[in-house]
Image (cartoon, rainbow, N blue to C red):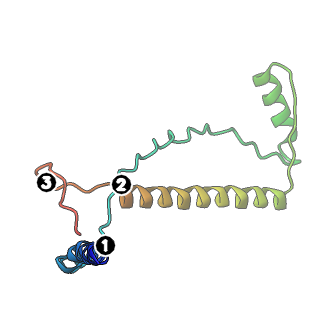
Amino acid sequence: MYLTRLKMIAVLMSVLLLTSCALMTKPPREVEIKTVPIKIKITQPVLPRPIDMKDPQWYVVSEKNLDEFLGRIKKESGGQLVFFAMSPGDYELMAFNLQEIKRYVKELKEVVVYYKTVTTVEEETNGTPEPENP
């Protein structure tokens, strides 16, 4: 009898110990999640130096001025004579290609300038950075 009473007390004490912590707990806190954009400083590449193109000397030679041209070239170049020939249609193609290169470089520069202005942190007039909007 004493042993059963002891067992009963032990079981009751165990149940009380195990459940007493569960009765005093606080309800769980509500978790609040915020998404805040973080501005990252992006280093800007140094723009390449501008193209320094030299103007070549172009000569227009026809049957009428061929002898005069040959004499002038032999005199200026020390007797060496070299011809590069191009038809008028090919010259137009070359001019078109150069305009395409010029257009492409201009548009590419606009893209670089756009990304540079978008990714640079703007500063106020007094030199302190603007506060970030959350």
User: Local crowd at mark 3 within 10 Å, few (<14), some, or many (≥20)?
Assistant: few
Point out the frontmost of discs 2 and 1: 1
Distance between mark 2 and mark 3 Cα atoms: 21 Å
* Label 3 vs 1, first from the N-terminus: 1
In the depicted view, which residue is nearer to us: 87 or 96? 96
Q: Tell me: residue 55, above or below residue 72.
A: below
What's under tag 2, amino acid-wise? Ile
Locate residue 117 relative to residue 72 in the image: left or right.
left
Residue under the point 83% across and 43% down: 65
Locate residue 42 relative to residue 30 in the image: left or right.
right
Give the residue pinned by disc 3. 125
What's under tag 1, amino acid-wise? Leu
Give the residue pinned by disc 2. 40
* Label 2 vs 3, first from the N-terminus: 2
Locate residue 81 relative to residue 126 in the image: left or right.
right
Q: Is mark 2 on a helix, strand or loop?
A: loop
Q: Of the numbered discs in the image, which one, if any, rests on residue 3?
A: 1
Residue under the point 58% across and 55% down: 105
**Which picture quadrant has residue 51?**
top right
Residue under the point 36% across and 58% down: 117
Give how far across and how far down residue 39 sits, in percent: 32, 58
Q: Quadrant of the C terminus?
A: bottom left
Q: Is mark 3 on a helix, strand or loop?
A: loop
